[in-house]
Each structure stands twice: as structure tokens, then as C-alpha cells.
Image (cartoon, rainbow, N blue to C red):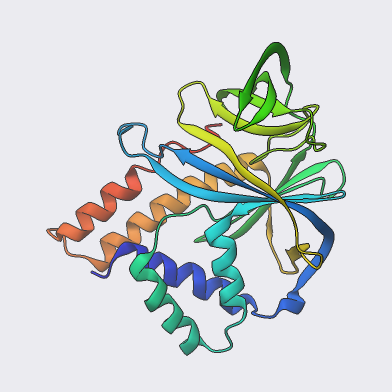
Amino acid sequence: MRNLILILAVFFSLSIFSQNSSDSDFIPIDSAKFVATYSLTYKLDSLNLDNIRNQEMWLFLGKNTSYFVSKSYHLDMQALSKLKTHAEVQLWIDKTSRNYKPRSNYFIYKNYPKGKITFIQHTLDGTFKYEETLDAIHWELTQDTATIGGYHSQKAICDFGGRRWTAWFCAGIPFNDGPYKFNGLPGFIVKIYDSRNHYVFELISIEVADPDLMITIRDKSYIETTKQKYLRAREAMRDGILNIIRQRSSGDDASQQRAAKRWASRNNYVELK
């Protein structure tokens, strides 16, 4: 059986490519003023906490809207959007899959539409999209302060997605924003982590964006849904991947067993509920 990562890369890449591959299919919604880079350290398998993963995430900050995405995934999608034929896509997949590393393939827009968080993710069943209220997170501010990554920061706590989160925010950075869906503090989140340190987002840098950098959204048909229905679809996607593995391999295939174990371990998402 071909490596599972390559199979998924082929699926997701060809799926996105087949939808369209032109920059004109992206609608500009805001001009990016700053780009914040976060490190994300996480444990995707709650039964194997020694398996620690890392990736870099980008938060594009506009005047009215922000956009959160995996850095490597964003760059890959930019590269794919410039390819014109399936042969070019296949060549790109063959080349990049050799050094492929798992990355998040969701996008999060804050205050788009106004007062909402828009969450978008590609799955085997299509591209899901749902909205939440922007001010749904209720923060408890503390008097604790510390210097985090060189920034004078204040501590805040919240409960979100089935986890207890501790955030450190810098009032000197004039954005009430942060990684993932986190927002609403009187300053910019420079570090946030859950009580078990399964997910840790930490600011690496914040830089002025290129003058022509736009925050965009793809103009396409989405599966409009609710968060609850999306979470059910997410589990169905994992089951679907396992079915693909079983269909492509014999019962005693060692690669099948490794792949099945790998995907069964995806049980510890940012939001548990």
C-alpha cells in the first residue's frame, strides 16, 4: 500500500485543485496590516502523550478581520493554486509528499461576517463551514503579570471547547485577538495553553505585512452546517480514512496496521466538545 500520507495528500490536493485553481476565485475581505507567527505544540493522541507534534501557524491581522491558518498549509495552497493541469499537480504531490509533515487544514476568520467566527475545514466529505458568535468566550482576568517572550503580559483564564485555558496577553499590542478562535481580551494573546499542556500556542513574531497582502476567502460552495454537525462529520472522516486503508490493503499488511493505528490516535483535538 502506498504511504497513507501520500494518499491523503493526493485526495486533498486534487479535491481543492478540481474546485478551481485561479487567484480570481478568492474574494478579498480585508487588507492585512500585520502577520503574527505562532508555534503550536500539541499532543494529538491522548493515549500517547510522548508523541509531541509541532507546526507554525499564521494569524493575519486586518483592520476589521483576522485570518488564522497553518503556515505550511497556506503556502502549499498558494503553490497549488498556480498549477494548471492535473499532471502538474501530481508532480507537485510526488515531490512534496517525500518530506510531508502533518499540518492543520482548517481556516478561521474572526469578525467575518461581522460579529461572527467563521470556521472552514476540508474533509473527505467536502469542505465544511460553520459560524459562531465572536464574543462567546468568557474570560476571567487575574492580577498576575509576567514577561512572556519579551512582552509584559497579564494572565486570563477561560473554559472553551471542553478545556480550561490560561492565556497571557499584552495590552501594549493593540489587537484583542490571538491564535485559533481566542479573542476578546484587552490586548494581544502572546501565549495560551490548556490545563494539561496538550495544546500550547506561543507567539514567535509579529511583523508588518506587505502592503498588497489581502485577507481573502475562496468563492465556492461550502457545506453550510453547525458546529455540532461538523464535529460528527469529523469523526465520520476519520472512520472513512480507516475504511480507505482497509480497502487498499490485505489484512496482514504491516503498513495498514501502522496507518490504522496512526489515524485511530487522532483523538485529542483542540476542541473536545
The image quadrant of residue 126 is bottom right
Relative to 140, residue 32 above or below: below
Residue sitting at x 46%, y 53%: 237
Residue 107 shows in this picture: no
29 lies left or right of 158: right
Residue sitting at x 50%, y 67%: 12
Give residue 89's position: percent from left, percent from top. Answer: 49, 82
**Count of picture labels:** 0
Foreground: 30 or 145? 145
Residue sitting at x 33%, y 32%: 49
253 lies left or right of 4: left
Give residue 41's position: percent from left, percent from top. Answer: 46, 39
Foreground: 102 or 263? 102
Foreground: 235 or 170? 170
The residue most toward the left is: 252
The image quadrant of residue 223 is bottom right
Residue 100 shows in this picture: yes
Give residue 87's position: percent from left, percent from top. Answer: 46, 89
Quarter of the image with the N terminus in it: bottom left
Quarter of the image with the C terminus in it: top right
The image quadrant of residue 139 is top right
Relative to 214, residue 108 above or below: above
Relative to 70, residue 23 above or below: below
Residue sitting at x 63%, y 31%: 150
The residue most toward the top is: 143
Give residue 172's position: percent from left, percent from top. Answer: 79, 31
